[in-house]
Image (tube, rainbow, N blue to C red):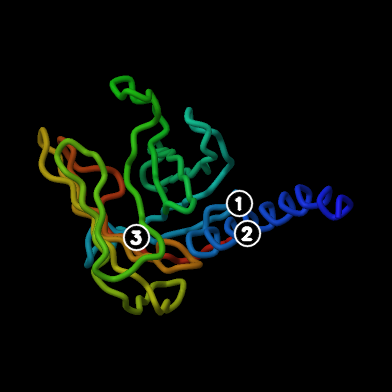
Amino acid sequence: MKAILKYIPALAVIYLTACNKNHDKYISEIFPNQVGDHWTYIYRTSPAGTDTSVVNVDIIGSTFLPDGELASIWVTRISNAPFYHDTSLVVANLFGVRIFNNRICRTCLDKGPGELGRYALPLKVNNKWFTHFPSGDTTRVLSELSVQVPAGTFDHTFQVSRTIGYSTNSFTNDTMFITPHIGMTKFIKREFDLGTVPGDGIWELSDYHLN
């Protein structure tokens, strides 16, 4: 009996490690978030616009947040805005997906990066959630549909809206089309912050590579 008992802690570690690996694999399949993942989008400033350019999104590495959470580093570049280089930090775990900016919030109690948005997984139609923006931030899953973009036709895609109310001449009214296992396949970005925000318009997935 003692011989059996001495192996129980080791078996427990193996079991928990396997569970964590399976969970990480599940999360990465539902919402790709691995170093080396890449998405390319055709970008237009309006539905009828002919002034197309390219948006490249890459996961270039990982880092730890001040609270110890592991976050992937996402970089977004727009071909017609060479000085635009947006970096965000993404955490995906049992609680869903949370997206942070890459700057320390000096006015926050935890002094961590500010939260830009989140997704509750799995995505389900009529679900909605909130983040703590002073002007209010609401995200809703509106529908499940099929979306056609240059990269192909993607079924079981969720249309998600995110709105942030007016605050000091700024607002957000975005619509994302998120396909599990693929990521964002289409993005209608409508933001205003004392002027037009880089990337405002329509993004359509044209190519991607996932690890």
On the image, the x and y values in percent for residue 26 come to 56, 63
Q: Is residue 36 left or right of residue 163?
A: right
**Mark 3 residue type:** Trp
> Residue drawn 32% across and 60% down?
187
Residue highlighted by disc 2: 211
- Above or below for 124 versus 3: below
Residue highlighted by disc 3: 203
- Above or below for 139 versus 156: above
Q: Which one is in front in this view, the residue at disc 3 or the one at disc 2?
A: 2
Q: How many C-alpha atoms fall within 10 Å of the one at disc 1: few (<14), some, or many (≥20)?
A: few
Question: How far apart are the alpha carbons under marks 1 and 2?
Answer: 6 Å
- Above or below for 67 versus 94: above
Asked if labels 2 and 1 touch by Cβ distance under 8 angstroms, the answer is yes
Residue that protrudes farthest toward the right in the picture: 3
Q: Earlier in the sequence, mark 1 or mark 2?
A: 1
On the image, the x and y values in percent for residue 35 come to 60, 49
Q: Quadrant of residue 123?
A: bottom left
Image quarter where the N terminus lies is bottom right
Question: How far apart are the alpha carbons under marks 1 and 3?
Answer: 21 Å
Count of number-bearing discs: 3
Question: How far apart are the alpha carbons under marks 3 and 2?
Answer: 22 Å
Residue highlighted by disc 1: 36
> Residue drawn 83% across and 48% down?
6
